[in-house]
């Protein structure tokens, strides 16, 4: 039981770290303040997942996303896309 809780805690902290990384570039709630960095808040999770796969496979080579996507697995990409989709929901709610 303790291992399961520790793993859940690790996953939660990893998720929180991923959210902070996305927010640093793409802005809180997916609203970028930088004209060179797209806002993700209006994009659905499926679209974002496809983009992340294209970055990872070097089909759409855009740095730093291509480098950041290397070594990610399907769950990582879903988490990133789900976060951005949640940001879109939050942005629409305001």
Image (cartoon, grey):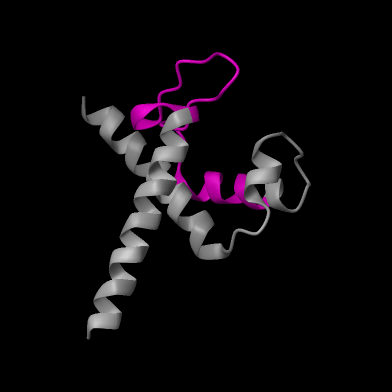
First to last magenta residue range: 25-53
Identify the residue at horizontal 35%, vertical 28% (top origin): 28
Percent x, y of residue 48:
54, 44
Identify the residue at horizontal 36%, vertical 64% (top origin): 11
Q: Is residue 88 found left or right of 50 in the rendered image?
A: left
Q: How many marks?
A: 0
Q: From the viewer's perspective, is residue 76 above or below residue 82?
A: below
Identify the residue at horizontal 38%, vertical 46% (top origin): 83
Percent x, y of residue 45:
46, 47
Q: Residue furthest bottom?
A: 1
Q: Is residue 78 found left or right of 9 in the rendered image?
A: right
Percent x, y of residue 44:
45, 42
Q: From the viewer's perspective, is residue 93 above or below residue 9?
A: above
| 51 falls in the magenta region | yes
Q: Is residue 30 found left or right of 36 in the rendered image?
A: left
Q: Quadrant of residue 71?
A: bottom right
Percent x, y of residue 66:
70, 43
Q: Quadrant of residue 84?
A: top left
- Near-viewer residue (71 or 57): 71
Q: From the viewer's perspective, is residue 22 above or below residue 5?
A: above
From the image, which quarter does the N terminus lie in? bottom left
| 49 falls in the magenta region | yes
Q: Quadrant of residue 4?
A: bottom left
From the image, which quarter does the C terminus lie in? top left
Q: From the viewer's perspective, is residue 77 above or below residue 91?
A: below
């Amino acid at each position: 039981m303790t291992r399961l809780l520790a793993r859940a805690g690790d996953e939660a902290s990893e998720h929180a770290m991923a959210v902070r990384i996305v927010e640093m570039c793409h802005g809180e709630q997916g609203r970028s303040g930088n004209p060179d960095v797209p806002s993700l808040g209006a994009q659905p999770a499926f679209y974002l997942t496809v983009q992340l796969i294209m970055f990872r496979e070097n089909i759409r080579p855009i740095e730093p996303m291509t480098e950041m996507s290397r070594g990610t697995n399907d769950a990582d990409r879903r988490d990133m896309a789900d976060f951005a989709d949640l940001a879109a929901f939050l942005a629409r709610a305001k």
